[in-house]
Image (cartoon, helix red, strand yellow):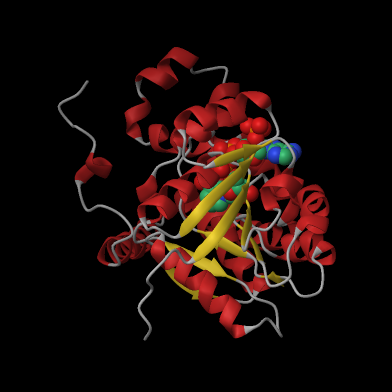
């Protein structure tokens, strides 16, 4: 194993500096991974705010200016904006550069970004499985990726040295790294992230539409379980619209299974089948324990919230 003496990359470009882009910048600075971090955001307000916080060395109005001469370019906009961003930066990409992304879906990224990548540039799609319900440059923080997984989905024929270098970058940001086929990634994320978000959006929407229960009652008694759904349902609407539009196949597959299982639960309640309910709830409790044992969540009651607070 070789020991690194200087930064891993001379110039890293972040196309999009919201929660994820800003967090990458903070983590890369913490890890000394880049000599220069260039950022791009589409609105003057976000560019101004990012410059004030100061996690990038330079901010650019034009994505190509941010990407020019970079040896690592990371697409950090919502997935629906990737194709236009890739087209815009393509002429500025230097041979040998690595282009990656943080998008929550991967097949669509291969489809939308791949065709714009010039010969001699390494394209390695990626997805850090870490986030919060907050967005924008102020939401970013260096510890976001610590202990979390980052999945890379390199295409067949990708140079191994480039994949290894990108893995080192993510490890330097605090992540654990795994590689996966993009189609499999989309199925795994459909069950672990996309459908759970859809369920949260749906239950909060249903509560909002109820006529027999007032909105103030829903808010007042939310600690009964609803409150935890509202955290997820507060996630960025643009990002999540793009996730569902771009992972349609896998989400519909998992939703089909989910609906069948929900019907079984509905029947168990109607028939008074307590054994069925008890067995399922015992199994699901074990899954929660496994997540805590794997260090992916806290064992503290109520996610560590201050229980004395009203
Ligand atoms: P965010 O906080 O809303 O930031 C998005 C950034 O992209 C902002 O800089 C925004 O600039 C820019 N942007 C938005 N629309 C654009 C467009 N049409 N063209 C060019 N730039 C645009 O979003 P985020 O949470 O960082 O998510 C970014 C990516 O990370 C998404 O692809 C998402 O799938 C992925 N991801 C998110 C999470 C999560 O939990 N949030 C986790 C893992 C991966 P302006 O402010 O100027 O519009």
- Image quarter in which the N terminus is found: bottom left
Residue 310's spot in the image, x, y percent? 22, 20
Q: Residue at x 56, y 38 (%)?
A: 18
Asked if residue 120 is positioned above or below residue 59 in the image, the reply reads below
Q: Residue at x 57, y 77 (%)?
A: 163
Residue 211 can be seen, yes or no: yes
Residue 224's spot in the image, x, y percent? 33, 32
Q: Nearer the viewer, residue 266 or 281?
A: 281
Residue 299's spot in the image, x, y percent? 22, 53
Ligand 1: quadrant of the figure: top right
Q: Quadrant of residue 125?
A: bottom right
In the displayed structure image, the side of residue 118 where residue 196 appears, left or right:
left
Asked if residue 78 is positioned above or below residue 4 in the image, the reply reads above
Q: Residue at x 59, y 77 (%)?
A: 162
In the displayed structure image, the side of residue 18 where residue 29 appears, left or right:
left
In the displayed structure image, the side of residue 42 where residue 115 appears, left or right:
right
Q: Quadrant of residue 280?
A: bottom left
Residue 250's spot in the image, x, y percent? 68, 63
In the displayed structure image, the side of residue 73 where residue 110 appears, left or right:
right
Q: Nearer the viewer, residue 250 or 242?
A: 242
Task: Count up the numbered dots.
Answer: 0
Residue 234 can be seen, yes or no: no
């Amino acid at each position: 194993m070789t020991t690194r003496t200087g930064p891993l990359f001379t110039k890293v470009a972040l196309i999009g500096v919201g929660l994820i882009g800003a967090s990458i910048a903070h983590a890369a600075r913490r890890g000394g991974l880049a000599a220069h971090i260039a950022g791009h955001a589409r609105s003057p307000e976000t560019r101004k705010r990012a410059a004030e916080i100061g996690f990038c060395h330079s901010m650019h109005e034009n994505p190509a200016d941010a990407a020019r001469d970079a040896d690592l370019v990371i697409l950090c906009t919502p997935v629906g904006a990737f194709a236009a961003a890739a087209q815009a930066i393509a002429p500025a990409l230097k041979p040998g550069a690595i282009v990656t992304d943080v998008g929550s879906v991967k097949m669509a990224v291969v489809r939308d970004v791949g065709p714009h990548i010039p010969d001699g540039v390494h394209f390695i799609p990626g997805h850090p499985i870490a986030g919060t319900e907050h967005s924008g440059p102020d939401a970013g923080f260096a510890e976001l990726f610590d202990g979390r997984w980052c999945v890379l989905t390199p295409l067949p024929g990708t140079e191994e040295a480039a994949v290894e270098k990108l893995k080192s970058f993510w490890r330097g940001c605090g992540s654990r790294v795994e590689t996966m086929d993009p189609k499999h990634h989309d199925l795994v994320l459909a069950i672990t992230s996309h459908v759970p978000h859809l369920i949260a959006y749906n239950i909060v929407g249903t509560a909002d539409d109820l006529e027999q229960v007032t909105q103030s009652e829903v808010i007042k008694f939310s600690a009964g379980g609803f409150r935890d759904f509202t955290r997820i349902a507060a996630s960025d609407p643009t990002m999540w619209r793009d996730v569902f539009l771009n992972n349609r196949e896998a989400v519909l597959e998992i939703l089909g299974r989910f609906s069948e299982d929900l019907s079984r639960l509905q029947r168990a309640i109607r028939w008074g089948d307590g054994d069925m309910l008890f067995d399922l709830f015992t199994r699901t409790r074990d899954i929660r324990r496994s997540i805590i044992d794997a260090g992916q969540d806290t064992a503290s009651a109520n996610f560590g919230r201050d229980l004395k607070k009203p």
